[in-house]
Image (spheres, grey):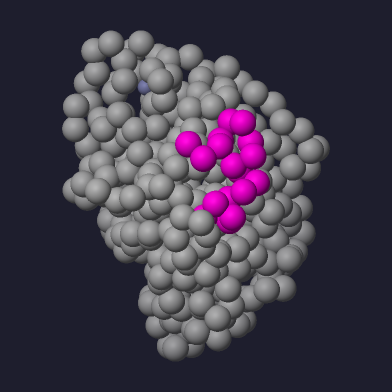
Amino acid sequence: MINNKLTKQELSRYSRHLVLPEVRIKGQEKIKQSKVLIVGAGGLGSPVALYLAAAGIGTIGIVDFDKVEENNLQRQIIHSTKDLGTKKTESAKNSINNLNPNVKVNLHNVKLDSKNALEIIKKYDVVIDGSDNFPTRYLVNDACVLLNKPDVYGSIFKFEGHVSVFNFDNGPCYRCLFPNPPPKGTIPNCAEAGVLGVLPGIIGTIQATEALKIILSKGEVLSGRLLVYDALNMAFRELKLGKNKNCPICGESPRIKELIDYEQFCQMKEEEEKSLEEDEINVQQMKKMIDNHEDFLLIDVREEPEWDICKIKGAKLIPLSQIMNRNIDILEDIEKDKNIVLYCHTGARSSEALQILRDEGFKNLKNLVGGIDAWANEIDQEVTIY
Ligand code: ZN
C-alpha cells in the first residue's frame, strides 16, 4: 500500500492548494493518489502534463510514439531544443520530473490501438485525450466507455479550440456528438491548416482543470457541454450536448461491445494502402523523372508564406487560392498537353488544384502524393520540414 499521506516537503510545495477549502489536505491526498493518462505528448499534452505534475498528481501516464521535431517547439512546451530527435515520452518525463520529482511517470511508447488501449487505460482514473486525429479520438472514447473512465477531450484547429468531458457521470460520449467520423479529406489537419502556438496552451490548461475537478469531486464538470474557444475574437461559447439514446456505444442498446479497427472506421487505412490513382505519382517516381531529365512543369500550389519556408528545386509557385479564383493568366502560356506535376504540403490541396486545372482543359496532370512533406522526408533532407 502506497503511503498517500503528505510529507513535510509536500505540505510546503502544495500550500496554495491546502488553503483552498475545496482542496485542503484531504483533497491534496486525493490528487496524490490519482492516476491520469495523457494520450499524446504534443500541443495539448504539454500543458496538461506540466500543470498536472505541478499540481501533485501521483501517477501520470503518457502515450506517444513520436520523436521531437523542430516544428513541434512552436507550441509543445514540454519539449525543448535540446530534446530534438528524442522520444517525446522521454522528453516529457524529464520535464515533468524536473518540475516535480514526486510524480511517478509511466511511459507508453506505443501507438495506442485496439489491441493495447484497454490494457493501458484500465490502470488510470482519468484519461485526457490530447490526440490530433479521428481514429485515436474514437478509440479513446470507446475504451473509456467500455472501462467506465472519464474522457477529457480537447481539440485545436487554427485559432479555435474545443473542450468537453465525455462519459462522465452518465453524460454523453464523443460518439453521442459525432456518431461517424467526417469524410476523409474534408477536414484538414493542423499540419495542413496551421495552429496558433498558444491555442493548445489554453485548451490543454482547461483539460487539466477538468481533470483536477473530477479527482476532487468539486465544481461543475464540463460534461454535457462543449466549450468552444475562438482566439481571434477572444470569445468562449458553450453548446449543450445531450446523451444520444441511440448512441452505438453508450446508448440504450449499444452495437459496439468491444474495440474495433479505428483506422478502417475512419477510412484512413483504406486510403493509405490503396495503390496510386492514375493521376497520382509518388516522390520516388518524381525523383526518377528529374534524374532522367524528363520534360515536365512542377507547380507548387501552396501559399506564399509556405513557399518562403521551403520549396522543391525548379518549381513554380501558383497558390491554390489563385487557381480557385480562376485567376490563372499565368497558365495561359502553358500548352494544354504539357506534363505537369502539382504539389502542396501533404497532397490534399494539390489534388483540389488538379481537378480545377483539368476542368480548364489541361490534359497531363499528376498530383504528388504526400506533397513536399514526403519529398523532404524521403528524398531531399535539405528541404525544411514544417
Ligand atoms: Zn455515446
Q: Is residue 352 above or below residue 172?
A: below
Say whether residue 244 is visible. yes
Query: Would residue 34 be found to the left or right of residue 300 on screen?
Result: left
Q: Is residue 289 above or below residue 59?
A: below
> Is residue 23 located in the magenta-colored stretch of the structure?
yes
Q: Position of residue 15 (x, y in %)?
A: 62, 48
Query: Would residue 30 be found to the left or right of residue 296 on screen?
Result: left
Q: Nearer the viewer, residue 283 or 168?
A: 168
Splitting the image into 4 quarters, where does residue 34 fall?
A: top left
Say whether residue 46 is visible. no
The residue shown at (32%, 40%) is 139
Give ligand 1's quarter of the image. Answer: top left
Q: Position of residue 346 (x, y in %)?
A: 51, 61
The residue shown at (46%, 55%) is 7
Q: Nearer the viewer, residue 12 or 199?
A: 12
The residue shown at (50%, 84%) is 381
- Specify start and end residues of the magenta stretch as a single range: 10-26
> Is residue 320 located in the magenta-colored stretch of the structure?
no
Query: Would residue 42 be found to the left or right of residue 323 on screen?
Result: left
Q: Quadrant of the C terminus?
A: bottom right
Q: Is residue 83 above or below residue 302?
A: below
Q: Position of residue 157 (x, y in %)?
A: 61, 45
